[in-house]
Image: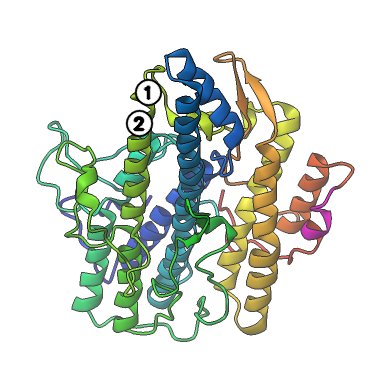
Amino acid sequence: MLQNFFAAESEVTPENIGEAIQQAIEIEIATIPVYLYTYYSIIRSPDQDAISGSLTQELVTVGKTPAEASAIALDLSAQIMVFANKAGALIMSVAIEEMLHMALSSNLKQALAGLPELVGKSPSVWPAYLPGHIPPFPIDRAGLSLNQLMTFLKIESPKPLPVRKQLEAPIPYKTIGLFYQMIIKCIEDYDLPYDLDSPQLLPNKGYYVQSNIDTIYYDRDHKPRYTNADDSGDLLYVKDRESAIHAINCIVEQGEGNPDAPGLNPDGSVDCGAIVPPDYDDPAREELSHFEKFAQVYCEYQTLTNRFNNLGIGVIDINEYFVVNVPTNPSTSKYPADIAAVSTLLNAVYTYIFVMVENCYKQSGSTQYEIFMFGIHKSMIFILNSLCGDIMQLSYLDPEDDTVYAAAPTFEDYPFGLVSSPKSQLVDLYYAAYPDGNYLEQRILDLPDVPLQYAGKF
C-alpha cells in the first residue's frame, strides 16, 4: 500500500522518495485509460449532411423559412464538425503527454530509487480515484460530455479543489502540482545519489513523438492545427539535481500549467471568461497546458450547446451529434462472449505496452531501441488503435438497463500468467478473438517477445 502523501503530516524524505515517485507514476497511469476511453467515444468526422438536414427540418417546423433554416443548419453543422475534430485532437494530445509524464517519472525513479513498476498499475475498480488526492473525486471511463470534461478539469486543476465541510482542514497538498513540489523539495534539501548506470528512456532516439495524425484537427478554413508543440517537453536523462527538477517541472507545466493561472471557481464551476489570455506550456506559446486544453473544450462545448438550445427546437446536448452511446465503466466480464474475446485481446495488448516499457528499464542500447520502436511505436500503437476501432463497431444489449450500447475498450490490466511468455499468451488471445485471422495477424506475430519483470504483479 502506497503512503498517502496528501495527508497533512506527510513529507517526502530520502527514505520514502521511491514510494513517492512510484505514487506519481501511478497517478499518471490512472489518467491514461480515462482520456483514451473518452477519446474513442468521439466521432471525429460526423455526417455533416445528416446533421444539417435534420436541423433544417426542425427549424422549418418552428417557423423558419427553408432558406433561413438551411443557412442556420449549415453554419451549426460546420461548427459541430470542427468542434468534434478539435475535441478529439486535444484529448488525444493530452493522453500522449501523460505517457511522456509516466516515462519522465519512471526515469526519475530509476535514477533515485530503482526500477519503476508499470505493469498492473491501471485502476482495477471504477469509478477510480487519483492515488492520495484530497478531496477525493470519482473518475469514470465515460463518453464525452460536460460532466466528463469537468472531471478532466479536476484532474488537471492548478488550484486546490473546493473541500467539503465535513473534511478536516487545513489540507496542505491538494493538487498533483503540489505533490510534485514535495518531491522537488526533497531533491533540493538532500544530497541524493543518482544511478548513472541503469537504463532510462532517453531523448533524441525517436521514442517520444509529440504529435500524430490523431492530435491534429482542421479549422473552419480547413487549415491543420497541431495541438502539441515540439518545444513543450521531451524525454530527459535524469542524472543530477538539475535534470531531476527539470523533468518534474516539465510534467507540471504540461499538465496543470502555471499555478497562478485561473483554475476552477471556488464553487467548482468554470469561468470561461478567465481562460483569456490562455495558459501555454511552451516557450513559443503554441501549446496549451492540459487544464487549459480541457477548459477550452468545456467552454466551447457549453457555448455551442447554448446556441442550439436557443433555437427553440427543444433541449439539446450536442454530444448526440458526434458521441457514440458507450456504457460508463464497462467491464469485459459483462460483455457478450464474442465482444469479450475482442475486449480481452485489447486489454492484453494494452497491458503488454506497459510490459515492454517496463522492460526498457532493464535493457539498453539496441535491445531497448528495438523493443520501443518495433514493439511500441510501429506495432503496438497500431494494434491498439485498430482494436479500439474494431470493438467500437460492435454493439450489445445491456440487460441491466435494457439499453443498446456500442462496445468500448475497457482498458483493464490483463493478468498474464507465468507459465508462458506474455507474447505467446497474446498470440493465443488473438486467435481466440479472430479464429480465421485478419489484417492484425502479422503485426501480432511480429511483436518482440518481452518477459514480465516482476513476479506476482497481479
Q: Position of residue 67 (x, y in %)?
A: 49, 27
Residue 334 numbered mark, or none? none
Q: Is residue 337 above or below residue 448?
A: above
Q: Is residue 396 above or below residue 262?
A: above
Horizontal side, residue 218 vs residue 394: left or right: left
Q: Along the line of sight, which residue is nearer the eye, 351 or 225?
A: 225
- Residue at image x 17%, y 39%? 163
Q: Along the line of sight, which residue is nearer the eye, 24 or 158?
A: 158
Q: Is residue 204 above or below residue 457?
A: below
- Which residue is disc 2 drawn over? 307
Q: Position of residue 157 (x, y in %)?
A: 27, 50
Horizontal side, residue 371 vs residue 74: left or right: right
Q: Residue furthest right?
A: 436
Colour option used: rainbow
At label 1, counting other C-alpha atoms closer than 10 Å, the crowd grade (few under 14, some 14-19, many 20 or more) is: some
Horizontal side, residue 248 vs residue 355: left or right: left
Secondary structure of the residue carrying tag 1 is loop
**Toward which corner of the image does residue 207 lie, by quadrant?**
bottom right
- Which residue is disc 1 drawn over? 311
- Residue at image x 63%, y 71%? 372
Q: Are marks 2 and 1 in contact (CB under 8 Å)?
A: yes
Range of residues picked out in magenta: 438-443
